Image (cartoon, rainbow, N blue to C red):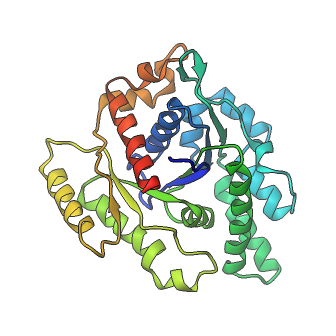
Amino acid sequence: MGDASGRVIAVANMKGGVGKTTTVVMLAEGFAAEGARVVVLDLDAQASASYCFAPDDELKTIISARKTITSFLADRILLNDRVPIHDYLTPAISKVTKAGEALPIDMVAASPRLRLLEREIILKMAEGKFGARSLEGQSLRVLQKAIGELKETYDVILFDCAPGISAFTEVAIRLADLVVVPTIPDFLSTLGFEAFRLSIWENAHVTRSSLPRPLRRPAVLPTRVSGRKRQHREVLDALMAEAGEADAPFELFGITIGDQAAIERAMDPEQFAEAPTFEQKWGASVASVRGLVNEIRRRLDG
């Protein structure tokens, strides 16, 4: 990505089941395989990305040790603790190797309690007679400082955002250099994307919010694409036509991610008895991973 470092990428969509976590893992391992220093921040209480990197007992140990985004946000916002984000990192979390070395990926994992944390913060704000804007401001202050700290160490900072729109997700989106929106090219997914885009980029709330405006239009990444489905072809054509207009409200990736068995296998940590190489893990889909990384590099540099 040129001479710049510390680029922030948020992977988000209001709708679940569109390949969001898969995209995060592809990007993390794809960038790391090219030598970039990567950190993943899991903002989804389902902790799917965390599980992909640290399955079962390892994730339990991380949560017990309070090395999670939940603990970081609770300590910073509820307890006003100034412990740096680096203290919540799990280093070298990837089991995938390249040239005999583990990929350089660190992570701040999620925990199921993240879902409750925002409610706790809202209750605390209400007790102090503070409104929603105070929650936005607190979240912005904390995550903005964390990003500043991480930019000193990492080339790529990846946010895996929860489905829906939480305060934390909204802040991550507004601080990102690029927001990648995985979207299946079918009626329901594109309808969900439209609602998501209007909520964050075009709703009247955008101008009333205390948060900064998003840095750029959302970038739609077609996922789980099947060339055999007529609806997929038709929806892709429609997205391409709209994205090509001068005042298009979104960008559209040139690459599409197919519904490949190789990707499903790569996303199952139990498929590999030993640490696989990058090429072994992604198999037939390795070209898709590299193509996605290369296109994101071009978009960020351009």
- Asked if 78 appears above or below 224 in the picture, the reply is below
Q: Report the side of 185 relative to 45 (left or right).
A: left
Q: Quadrant of residue 251?
A: bottom left
Q: Is residue 189 left or right of residue 103?
A: left
Relative placement, left or right, of 171 versus 206 is right
- At horizontal 41% and vertical 75% (from top left) the residue drawn is 198
Task: Report how many numbered discs are placed on residues in the image.
Answer: 0
Question: Along the horizontal axis of the image, is 113 left or right of 277?
Answer: right
Q: Residue at x 14, y 41 (%)?
A: 228
Q: Is residue 142 shown to the viewer in this render?
A: yes
Q: Residue furthest front?
A: 3
Residue 43 seen anywhere in this rendered image of the structure: no
Location of residue 208 in the rendering, given as x and y in whole percent from the top left corner: 57, 86
Q: Position of residue 165 (x, y in %)?
A: 53, 66
Where's the C terminus, which quadrant? bottom left
Rendered image quadrant of residue 227: top left
Q: Residue at x 39, y 59 (%)?
A: 219
Q: Position of residue 301 (x, y in %)?
A: 46, 53
Q: Closer to the camera, 195 or 6?
A: 6
Residue 237 or 45: which is nearer the viewer? 237
Residue occupying the point 27% across, 65% down: 243
Image height of 238 relative to 132, above or below: above
**Closer-to-camera residue (29/268):** 29
Q: Position of residue 146 (x, y in %)?
A: 72, 55
Q: 25 and 147: which one is in front?
A: 147
